[in-house]
Amino acid sequence: MNLHEYQGKEILNSFGVRIQRGRVAHSHKEAVEVAKQIAAETGTGWWVIKAQIHAGGRGKGGGVKLAKNLAEVDSISQDIIGMMLKTPQTPPQGKKVSQVLIAEDVYYPGEHEPEEYYMSVLLNRETSRNMIMYSTEGGMDIETVAEETPHLIFTEEIDPTVGLLPFQARKIAFNFGLSGVALKEMVKFVTALYKAYVESDASLFEINPVLKTSDDKIMAVDAKVSIDDNALFRRKEYAEMRDLREENPIEVEARAAGLNYVDLDGNVGCMVNGAGLAMGTMDLIKQAGGEPANFLDVGGTADAKRVETAFRIILKDSNVKAILVNIFGGIVRCDRVAQGVVDAYTNMGDAINVPIIVRLQGTNAKEAKELIDNSGMEIISATEFKEAADKVQEVLAK
């Protein structure tokens, strides 16, 4: 589950990570009032206005601007709220901005020049260990840094049995070239950040940039945070932060129905039970010359109601030209699945306007095929993987 920047910063702050202070506003008038409050608390005379959407690259799209007085806070907020913000990480049409973060200006003059760094905490799936990735090239796309100057990216892996050790936090600070107060501040920052990552059940904390201010404070100026969906049952306070406006509406509907669904860009809808079989089915579709339109795992049950719900969700995608149902009957019998498909087809009537190929293998697969073949409905049955692929290829060629 992705969070907005202001929500991620709230979590960081709760674990003692120094952040760029600010508050969210939903209108330009509220933005002015928030700016006044922040000025009173921090003494700042300039404010940063940041669009709050689940996407990076907001500054390049015009979603992050500096206001030097309250009049500019008003006008800039009015321009940003309601705009369709387009960045490299949004859909082509962009995302509508419903709120802005009004944050204090932290690039104030002082004894030293401010410096920007990059830092993230995530799981290294190759080693099954958490790692801290960091670079002196803060404020830039980390992908660009990795491609053009990979020697400027460092990683520190953490042994899960002992956690982040003090020498590792100091090593990170040394690699940034810090000393004195700034080094001590960075050690505290890294230690608190890793604690926040672990104890909030996050799957990603990305801070870009981490700022060393002109008076050697270390703080998070931005925050991209993702919480592990599987941990939300014990993180109710984080689950309440979910902004459904930022998520694919079809995926939201599928989640509410208890279906595991991921929207893709292809033309063949998939209905499968089991993640491994779903991945194999997507490969099957590719080999048949199609492109998967979704990942949909109906789970261990596939009764008529569940199958019908899955069909309706798949058909919300206008790009779908065919649907492949690929079920292995282990816990659930194939003939029951077949009856569910037939009942769903009957209930939906003209709502099903694309060919459906059904491959059922496992318990009572023979009876299931006979049931579908004798249903009198325009459902194409298959038994083997290659046969299903050929059927997909045939309907796409028409």
Image (tube, helix red, strand yellow):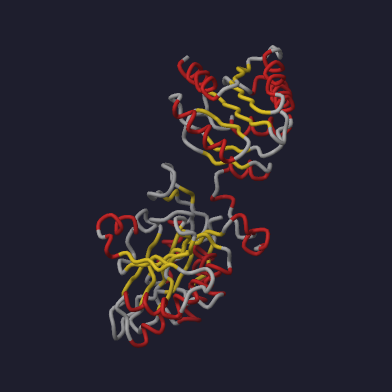
Q: Is residue 378 left or right of residue 264?
A: right
Judge from the rendering whether residue 343 lies leftward or rightward of residue 78; answer left or right: right
Expressed as whole percent of the image width and height from the top left, the position of residue 349 reads 68, 20
Give the quadrant of the N terminus. bottom right
Q: Which residue is at 46% across, 30% downward? A: 291
Question: Of 89 and 310, which appears nearest the observer?
Answer: 310
Q: Position of residue 155 (x, y in %)?
A: 37, 66
Residue at 40% x, 84% y: name it.
184
Residue farthest toward the bottom in the current orientation of the protein: 180
Taking the spot 54% from the left edge, 62% from the top edge, the residue there is 202
- Residue 279 vs 156, above or below: the answer is above
Occupied quadrant, residue 115: bottom left
How many marks overall?
0
Residue 6 vertical placement versus 385 (above, below): below
x, y percent for residue 360:
64, 25
Which residue is depicted at the point 32% across and 61% down?
140
Q: Nearer the viewer, residue 164 or 11?
A: 164
Q: Quadrant of residue 329?
A: top right
Q: Quadrant of residue 237?
A: bottom right
